[in-house]
Image: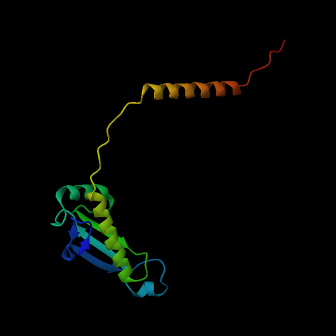
Amino acid sequence: MIRVNENISIEEQEIEEDFVLASGPGGQNVNKVATAVQLRFQVMDSPSIPEPVKHRLLKLAHNRITKEGVLIITARSHRTQEQNRREARERLASLVAKAAVVEKPRVRTKPSRAAKERRLENKQKRANLKKLRKHIPKNEH
């Protein structure tokens, strides 16, 4: 069981893990042992995750989700299967935890009158500074 937070836990049978050959460090071990982990998690069919969290997770991880709704996480940075497996599970838990947080909607505000005036004053100062840099041609009489 993967514990995401106090309300959400993902059961082992909901996760499918495949071990594949990894690239990167490991010497000859890379060619012999399948140390990389490809974790698959069926988001929409999961009974462990509430509906609103599922939809936020689909939005959050849209580039890692297949058309069938399967979230794929690949971990290959470590030399052992167990470390890669742990990393993949931690990344899944952090993604679900991030999706569990409800973002507060942004309230549109207008700049105050003083802020508008400050902006215009700074703009005028900048324009004057640039005007002073202008090359003035000499009159040739």
In-image side of 33 versus 7 (left or right): right
The residue positioned 47% from the left and 26% from the top of the image is 114
Closer-to-camera residue (125/130)? 125
Q: Is residue 96 above or below residue 109?
A: below
Q: Quadrant of residue 101?
A: bottom left
Q: Is residue 66 above or below residue 75?
A: above
The residue positioned 70% from the left and 28% from the top of the image is 133
Q: Is residue 84 above or below residue 63?
A: below
The residue positioned 24% from the left and 75% from the top of the image is 16
Q: Quadrant of residue 65?
A: bottom left
Rendered location of residue 31, percent (x, y): 43, 85
Rendered location of residue 51, percent (x, y): 17, 57
Closer-to-camera residue (82/5)? 5
Rendered location of residue 7, percent (x, y): 21, 64
The residue positioned 40% from the left and 75% from the top of the image is 76
Quadrant including the N terminus: bottom left
Closer-to-camera residue (67/3)? 3
Q: Quadrant of residue 113?
A: top left
Report how many numbered discs are placed on residues in the image: 0
In-image side of 128 versus 70 (left or right): right
Rendered location of residue 141, percent (x, y): 84, 11
In-image side of 53 versus 125 (left or right): left
Q: Residue furthest top?
A: 141
How is the rendered protein coloured? Answer: rainbow
